[in-house]
């Protein structure tokens, strides 16, 4: 009893120390692994996400979708010199003009990540590896018999460089765009995916 | 005498906690006093012009004056610069200090024609 009485004041001191210490320890653990969006990166990213599909659409209108998208991605890289912009995109295009199963699907990967990447593309049960040097594109074709709940769609899985994306119900008769866009400046980092069918 | 020591220790603990809370609240006030990010305001203005269907036609034509006249902003001066794929620019950056810049990249209007539009606020 005597000991407990003697500790009364110290208990409050110790409590105050512990609360303050816990606060600062909590701050350390509360830090996100990736920096939260800050400064201008998030709206630059929003701008890029709006314009990439638009560039593909303009390219489709001019019957050169991959060429236009590649050109525009290079333009982004040059224009956004004040941030470290990098991207990888995949475009699917049905090139079977008689529109009868099995369909021939052209899949093009554009790599603007700054290093060579091997992209694994799986459609249904068929898988293909496409190696794409930096700042270039590479294509492969798939023969697919369209199966699934909706006959006009297919499922595709894309994986590269530690990133994997499963896309279900990809529309066969449209150009489809998957893009991974990264923006970095110092410790600020934005990395987001974009999946979009085009008109 | 022991009672005074206990009281002193409790007071010391209370002072530590109050000081700690005051320091934190002052830090929060400092953050809230940071001036608004006008880069983002400039970007929002450009995006708004795009949503209204004005930005792309003026950008494609390199008509920076008409684009600038569409911007209504009373508290700040503003100017527009439009650069094409070859980095030929119409309009220019202001010769002023504390200039905020909003950057908007477009792939084109009806045809592929990439441009970068910069709105300067100062």
Image (tube, helix red, strand yellow):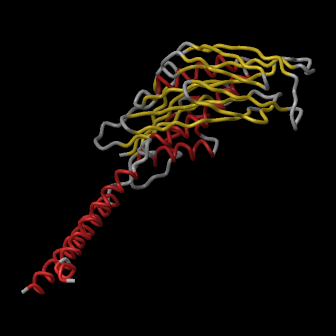
Residue shown at 59%/14% (left/top)? A132
Image height check: is B71 above or below A118? Answer: below
Which of B116 and A109 lies nearest the eye of the viewer? A109
B109 left or right of A168 in image: left
Q: Residue at x 49, y 31 (%)?
A: B82
Return the x and y of residue A157 as percentages of the image width and height. 70, 29
Q: Position of residue A194 (x, y in %)?
A: 63, 35
In the foreground, B122 or A40 = A40
Please state the horizontal and vertical placement of residue A11, each as a whole percent of the image: 23, 74
Q: Is residue A159 above or below residue A106?
A: below
Residue A136: image x %, image y %? 57, 14
Relative height, residue B105 to residue A101 (above, below): below
Which of the 4 image quadrants contains residue B17? bottom left
Identify the image quadrant of the C terminus of chain A: top right
Q: Nearer the viewer, residue A40 or A107?
A: A107
Residue A69 appears left or right of B43: right
**Residue B1 image-quadrant placement:** bottom left
* Residue A177, picture quadrant: top right
The image quadrant where one finds the N terminus of chain A is: bottom left
Q: Total number of numbered labels? A: 0
Residue closest to the far front:
A1
């Amino acid at each position: 009893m005597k000991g407990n009485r003697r500790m009364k004041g110290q208990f409050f001191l110790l409590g105050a120390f512990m609360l303050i210490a816990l606060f600062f320890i909590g701050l350390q653990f509360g830090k996100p692994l990736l920096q939260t969006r800050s400064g201008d990166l998030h709206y630059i990213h929003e701008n890029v996400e709006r314009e990439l599909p638009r560039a593909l659409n303009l390219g489709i209108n001019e019957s050169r979708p991959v060429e236009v998208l590649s050109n525009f991605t290079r333009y982004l890289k040059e224009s956004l010199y004040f941030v470290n912009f990098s991207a990888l995109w995949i475009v699917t295009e049905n090139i079977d003009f008689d529109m009868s199963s099995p369909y021939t699907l052209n899949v093009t990967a554009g790599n603007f990540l700054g290093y060579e990447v091997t992209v694994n593309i799986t459609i249904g049960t068929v898988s293909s590896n496409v190696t794409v040097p930096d700042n270039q594109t590479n294509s492969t074709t798939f023969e697919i018999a369209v199966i699934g709940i909706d006959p006009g769609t297919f499922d595709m899985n894309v994986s590269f460089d530690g990133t994997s994306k499963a896309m279900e119900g990809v529309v066969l008769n449209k150009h489809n765009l998957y893009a991974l866009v990264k923006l970095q400046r110092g410790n600020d980092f934005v990395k987001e995916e974009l999946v979009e069918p085009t008109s | 005498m022991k009672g005074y020591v206990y009281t002193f220790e409790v007071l010391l603990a209370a002072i530590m906690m109050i000081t700690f809370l005051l320091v934190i609240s002052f830090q929060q006030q400092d953050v809230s006093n940071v001036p608004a990010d006008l880069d983002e305001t400039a970007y929002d203005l450009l995006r708004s012009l795009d949503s209204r269907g004005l930005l792309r036609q003026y950008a494609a034509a390199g008509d920076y004056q008409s684009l600038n006249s569409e911007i209504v902003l009373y508290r700040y001066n503003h100017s527009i610069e439009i650069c094409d794929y070859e980095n030929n620019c119409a309009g220019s950056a202001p010769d002023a200090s504390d200039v905020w810049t909003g950057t908007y990249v477009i792939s084109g209007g009806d045809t592929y024609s990439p441009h970068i539009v910069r709105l300067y606020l100062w």
